[in-house]
Amino acid sequence: MDDQLLSQRLATIQSQVHEQGAELIAVTKFVDSQTTRLLYEMGQYHLAENRSDKFLAKLEDLADIKDQITWHFIGHLQSRQVKLIINQIDYLHSLDRMSLAKEIQKRADHPIQCFLQVNVSGEESKGGFAPDQVDEAVGSLKDYDKIRLVGLMTMAPIDANEADLHHYFQTLKNLQVRIAERGLAYAPCSELSMGMTRDYPIALSEGATFIRLGRALFNQDQPQ
């Protein structure tokens, strides 16, 4: 992509997201380290990867600026990979099972800001806790001092219509509010990570605080 086009697109989306009081996360999993560096130079400091090997490679390539970047890990994290990346990231958006929480507790050297992944649509192809499992999961985390539950995350079905998208995002928002009202020190749960390229305007309207965008920034076929 042309650098000027990327800069214009980034500025437009940043403005749209920030107007709603949310933070843009640029998903850099499909772009190289040079483009990732360019985003940083354009003032985009929240970046996300979804594969541990590619993330670690980019840390090496971007060694001079990696500590100025807020790193989000958004993909499924295998337990055996936890030790490789958990102390290198700022946010984990995919805490999708208690066995992962146990491994984080074992491997982290400081409290990790985590989002509980919630499967609001019930799709079998997606991981995460069912909505009716969230309260129990949150309660179980009280003994994990290396996990700070900052919010909830979900991914809507790619074929969901507008009404269903509102429903899914409202469901997550209601869960987030309910947990936040409990006043748990280890689980403030003030954040909502929801909304990607095809559905982020609806997610913003339903209270998203973190938007995860890749194609909207980099895809040549996206509207300008």
Image: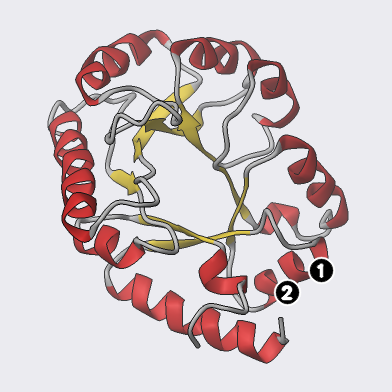
Dot 1 falls on a residue whose secondary structure is: helix
Farthest-out residue, front? 159
Q: Residue under circle 2? A: 38
Please name the amino acid that badge 2 sits on: Leu
Farthest-out residue, right? 61
Quarter of the image for residue 15 reads bottom left
Image check: 94 left or right of 61? left
Q: Position of residue 190 (x, y in %)?
A: 27, 42
Tell which of 166 and 192 is nearer to you.
Answer: 166
Residue 34 numbered mark, or none: 1
User: What's the residue at 34%, 13% (across, down)?
Assistant: 142
Image check: 38 left or right of 10? right
User: What's the residue at 40%, 26% (across, down)?
Assistant: 124
Distance between mark 1 and mark 2 Cα atoms: 6 Å
Please name the amino acid that badge 1 sits on: Gln
Q: Are marks 1 and 2 in contact (CB under 8 Å)?
A: yes
